[in-house]
Amino acid sequence: MADRAPAQLIDGKVFSERLRAEVAVEVSRLRAEHNLQPGLAVVLVGEDAASQIYVRSKGEQSLAAGMHSVTHRMPADASQHDLMRLIAELNEDPLIHGILVQLPLPKHLDEKPVLAAINPDKDVDGLHVVNAGRLASGLPGLYPCTPMGSMILLRETLGDLSGKRAVVVGRSVLVGRPIAQLLLQADCTVTVAHSRTQDLPAVCREADILVAAVGRPRMIRGDWIKPGAAVIDVGINRVPFDDPEKAAAGRTKVVGDVHFKEASQVAGWITPVPGGVGLMTVAVLLQNTVTAAKRLNGLA
Amino acid sequence: MADRAPAQLIDGKVFSERLRAEVAVEVSRLRAEHNLQPGLAVVLVGEDAASQIYVRSKGEQSLAAGMHSVTHRMPADASQHDLMRLIAELNEDPLIHGILVQLPLPKHLDEKPVLAAINPDKDVDGLHVVNAGRLASGLPGLYPCTPMGSMILLRETLGDLSGKRAVVVGRSVLVGRPIAQLLLQADCTVTVAHSRTQDLPAVCREADILVAAVGRPRMIRGDWIKPGAAVIDVGINRVPFDDPEKAAAGRTKVVGDVHFKEASQVAGWITPVPGGVGLMTVAVLLQNTVTAAKRLNGLA
């Protein structure tokens, strides 16, 4: 493999910027032609530092796309009842088309009834069981952002996916399973592999499209990859620096589920981590909010 | 392959009788210990001859298992409104735990809102989008009968399925996709193949467990099968007799999606058609009704 040209990078920055620009154009059209401004409500309970950053980014990006954007901050000791009441209000609010509850919730709150209470047609995170059912049944719905983002990267890179062999490593309800459903809808022959799979490297080598969604740093090695394959790395794992001095100083960095250095010598296309799928997620969230706004107003 | 012993038959009659006997024991226990008699309501609209036979069989088998059984027959010109009202009544009826609307409905009726109106917790056919979502999300629910029946046959035949490679040919919402979900839940490495799959014979040959759910008579040939594999044939196709005289007389018979004669020389286990998966379907319907009755009464 040493003489193979290194893989082309699938640049999440380029594609997420393009998607956000498309969303902004559509928002502007909806405002001009239908007096409809898609609205996103983000609910944040408590003070978790990472969550604060994510929520701020979602608010800023939705505003930048011309959307109506509201962030509801509740104290860390908010009650289940108060949170449920807020969801009920947002379900009824005609200016809000997308509702996102930032996870994780503080430990005293029960996440399941909160997510179940969101109107499925405003569930822009695609986490509601009704949306999982719509996806499994090939019906229109709101689908999870990271899987949708992965599909956009694949379509932009490969064009028609029909007939390609796709292997998804990981079967989580949030990522692996919905990606498998979306690949099937795109007419791929889809295999779902996981911790119980025998000879995982051989199964991975069957893939024209390899999606890694396991949550184990650099698990997928270069010789697991079919030469020329498209590799989508959904993993986001924080690990110590390779440099022992930096590592000793406690410094960490983010890597994917794929051993990038090895894989990029074999694959045809590969997403970097960071800078790949992760960047698509918020852009798809905005797109989902626009889709929800149109459907709720009979425009799609 | 000629010197290979022919495959062992997976006898749907044996396993469906066993399941019905188990259901009868559980019904009797629920009646004795909890004064709870699981109740199934079957709704038949119109006079379709095949539907009449199916509905009669479901009624008889539920009675034979000791269940409460009601068949609602509506005239062929029944209105959507009347049908919806009946569903609403059955949803509220505390003696009814399972509701099955016999399909197809007469053409003037819209099937989707009828199925969507059934309380998902009484949806013993497992057709409701909420149950599809529960299955896709690994949550308890009521799952479709033919896929569940296929899983029972596999578990009874092979025991633990963990790590086996399963290939499902066909991606229908009613059969192929739910079987794939159930195989994944059983820790198989699952591939879904379909009309767009390239080199389908080679993909099928990867399978330790091959499930055919395509609806094309005898499509899957002997040399598509890995020696020793377990073959589950979900297809039910009516074809002319092979004998040209009988065929000329217009006589037909039922065959599966698998070329049984060839496949049984290669496979380790195989379901016949008829006499295989098809027989499991009503037995699972009864089992689903018992499950629904227990859950609706807080007993499971």
Image (spheres, coloured by chain):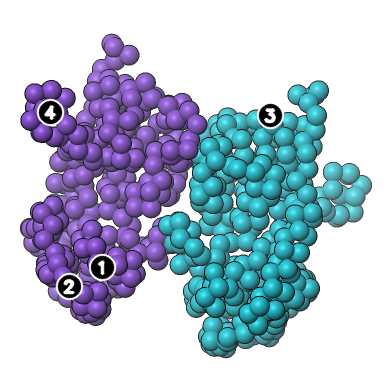
Chain colours: A cyan, B purple
Q: Is residue A286 above or below residue B15?
A: below
Both labels 2 and 4 in a single chain: yes
Residue on which disc 2 sits:
B78
- Element type at mark 1: loop
In space, the residues marked 3 and 2 are separated at their CA atoms by: 60 Å
Q: The numbered mark 4 sits on a residue in which chain?
A: B
Both labels 3 and 2 in a single chain: no
Residue furthest top in the image: B3
Both labels 4 and 3 in a single chain: no
Q: Residue at x 34, y 48 (%)?
A: B175
Inspect the image, locate mark 2, and give the three-letter code of the amino acid beneath it. Answer: Ala
Q: Is residue A198 visible?
A: yes
Q: Residue at x 58, y 61 (%)?
A: A144
Residue on which disc 3 sits:
A227
Inspect the image, locate mark 3, and give the three-letter code of the amino acid beneath it. Answer: Pro
Q: Nearer the viewer, residue A96 or B249?
A: B249
Residue A193 locus on image (x, y percent):
53, 41
- Element type at mark 4: helix
Q: Is residue A195 visible?
A: no
In space, the residues marked 2 and 4 are separated at their CA atoms by: 39 Å
Task: Indicate the quadrant containing the C terminus of chain A: top left, top right, bottom left or bottom right.
Answer: bottom right
Inspect the image, locate mark 4, and give the three-letter code of the amino acid beneath it. Answer: Ala
